[in-house]
Image (cartoon, helix red, strand yellow):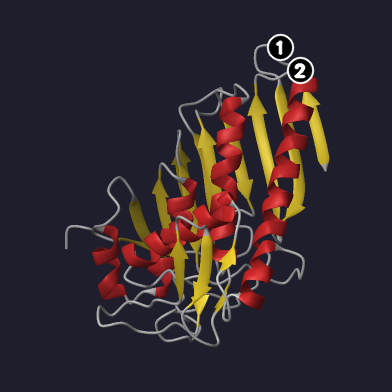
Amino acid sequence: MQFQFSDKNPHHPVTYASFFSMHTRIELVATGFTEEKGRELAQSIEAEVKAMEHRFNRFDDTSPMSVVNMRATNEAVTVDDELFMALELCEAFRRGTGGYFDVATASAATDEGYAVSYLLDPKKHTVKFTHQGVSLDLGGFAKGFALEQVCRRVREAGAENALINFGNSSVAAIGHHPYGECWSVGVEHTKVKGTMAREIKLNNGAMSVSGRNSDGVYHIVNPITGGLVAGDELVIVEGRSALVCEVLSTALYAAPRAQRSVIMKQYEGYTATELYCREGGSCEIRTIDCNK
């Protein structure tokens, strides 16, 4: 972990910490802590995030998620409270997005047009796959879930103003910049490196952006078709919950444009925009209108 502390301004001492987890750089900026308390908070956050990374990592043979993938085709697998809650949330989001957010591969269509790949028993806390070939990948969920938990921990520690950044694609703000009315977050232009395409102003809220990765590679899968989404736009979602923003930005990018406003109708209090970056540095912004 990289840790820095400054009390040059005694009214707003600054804690900064960064570490690598979940395949991304995670950063914390918070004001109002002593150096000792700031370091303690940063260390606890790193430990919690890395514990969640292990829990949800399907590539780690010792992780609870990997155990589910290995055994749940043949038997109902008992999981702990956190993983069961995560799977319940994933199922709720799958239904709320019309199937465009789905942590399961090889899903089976139902009469309702949705996919039921795993069954949850809330009394026994078990998960069972419905057919052969199912595998769960919580990568698109875990980052937003972890960011939500980090925000909770930072608030409980007494922070009034803080910014938590997960790889520049998912950001959450507590309060505002001590010398302003918000935290200002830039979205990088996809065609002109080092250029800001849009400024997002956060105050007790979160944002998430989905699209091609920083190397220009398409990586988001359409759960309905199973193919990679090849959209050149970025989808930006803003709202109060970091987890919902993460899920929505992923689902909206995967969904056809005609379906995006339909999905947004299910999530009051959230706004979504499509950002089209052009050669030369210009941008076009389109609001996804939930009233359509």
Look at label 2 and name its amino acid: Asp
Q: Would residue 161 appear left or right of 207 to someone viewing this image?
A: right
Task: Give the residue at the far left of this rendering.
Answer: 292
In this rendering, the answer to whether 230 lies above or below 88 is: below
Quadrant in the picture for the C terminus: bottom left
Q: Would residue 187 appear left or right of 262 to someone viewing this image?
A: right
Q: Would residue 81 appear left or right of 248 to someone viewing this image?
A: right
In this rendering, the answer to whether 195 lies above or below 199 is: below
In this rendering, the answer to whether 288 lies above or below 259 is: above
Q: Which mark is residue 58?
A: none
Tell me if label 2 and label 1 are in contact, CB under 8 Å.
yes
**Residue at horizontal 55 percent and vertical 35 percent from the top:** 152
**Residue at horizontal 64 percent and vertical 54 percent from the top:** 167
Question: Which class describes the residues within 10 Å of circle 2: few (<14), some (14-19), or many (20+)?
Answer: some
Question: Which class describes the residues within 10 Å of circle 1: few (<14), some (14-19), or many (20+)?
Answer: few
* x then y, percent, for residue 113: 28, 80
Residue receiving disc 2: 7
Count of numbered circles in the view: 2
In space, the residues marked 2 and 1 are separated at their CA atoms by 5 Å
* x then y, percent, for residue 162: 59, 31
| Residue 181: quadrant of the picture | top left
In this rendering, the answer to whether 232 lies above or below 264 is: below
Tell me if residue 28 can be seen. Answer: yes
* x then y, percent, for residue 55: 68, 58
| Residue 264: quadrant of the picture | bottom left
Residue receiving disc 1: 10
Look at label 1 and name its amino acid: Pro
Per the image, label 1 sits on a secondary structure element best described as loop
